Amino acid sequence: MRLSDVFAALDELYPPAWAESWDAVGPVTGDPGQDVRRVLFAVDPLAPVVAEAVAWNADLIVAHHPLLLRGVTGVAATTPKGRAVHTLISNGVALFTAHTNADVADPGVSDALARAVGVTGELRPLVPSADDPRRGLGRVGTLPEPTTLAAFTAAVARGLPATAWGVRAAGDPGRTVVTVAVCGGAGDSLLGAARAAGADVYLTADLRHHPATEFAEQDGPALVDAAHWATEWPWLADAERRLGALLGPGTLETRVSTLVTDAWSLHDEGVK
């Protein structure tokens, strides 16, 4: 399998035209003519993930977050990103990014998040795309049976990989939860959409103090906040499965990285 064929398959699954104008998606490193046997899926193309790829003899990393989102004037190995580029190229490891185009895909990042925390009902976008209402940011669905906010928060903690950030909730612990809105990654821009969707709870990441407290005062959905990395990690297995199905079983050897690359690595609740 040529790298160009894998790139084409990834573009079919997550068309670059779906990405936001500010985003940087698609191939980052790699010779399109090189052979591909092993593909590693990861959220962040950070140094530990690059080292994992090299140690596993991977030919390609498919990452959710871009390595070079902002413009650069050089990639000297004197910077972390420059060292990553040098390590990738010198070891023949290609890098491909599917970011906001994977966020709005059907299925995409938020579909995988919803399924990971127990949402079994039909999913619909929280904010549908203008050109296709089946795609869009976030998802809304229902649980198989009513539960409480406390029990749902515990289910989120069980369904997502453990992080130092953990899982926290805002709202009455005994509140009934049936309709769930989710958005993988930073989702406080969709707080209003979650309320408009009639959700009982909204699960996302990176909720800031002031928007969260103001939202809670308006008697909207309860809030559940998890680590950014953890809310996007479930998508990796879905992308792995979809790429394998498109290219054919056994075409590639694939693996999902379990390295925790969330920025927060220590948590202390203090003296009780």
Image (spheres, rainbow, N blue to C red):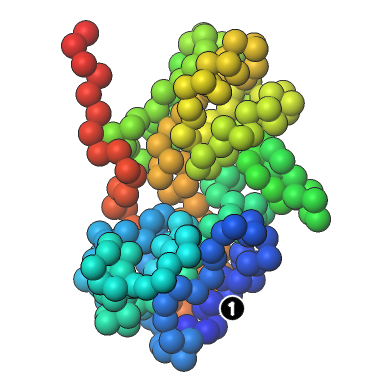
Measuring from the top left, give residue 160's x and y in whole percent.
41, 38
Amino acid at circle 1: Ala
Q: Is residue 232 above or below residue 173?
A: below
Q: Please state the total of marks drawn on the protein image.
A: 1
Q: Residue at x 52, y 34 (%)?
A: 204
Residue sitting at x 71%, y 51%:
135
Image quarter of residue 140:
top right
> Looking at the image, which residue is at 34% across and 72% down?
75
Residue 184 can be seen, yes or no: yes
211 lies above or below 6: above
For label 1, the SS is helix
Residue 68 position, x and y percent, is: 44, 64
Q: Residue at 65%, 12% (x, y): give it.
A: 218
Counting from the top left corner in percent of width and height, residue 175 is at: 56, 11
Screen quadrant of the C terminus: top left
Residue at image mark 1: 8
Q: 214 above or below 100?
A: above
**Residue 123 seen:** no
The crowding category of the residue bearing disc 1, from other C-alpha atoms within 10 Å (few below 14, some 14 to 19, many at least 20), is few
Instruction: Choose between 53 and 66: the one closer to the eye.
Output: 66
Query: Where, by quadrant of the figure, is residue 165 drawn?
Result: top left
- In the displayed structure, does residue 69 sit left or right of residue 195? left
Q: Residue furthest left?
A: 271
**Residue 166 appears at what percent x and percent y?**
35, 30
Check the image and report above or below for 124 versus 134: above
In the picture as drawn, the residue positioned furthest to the front comes out as 73
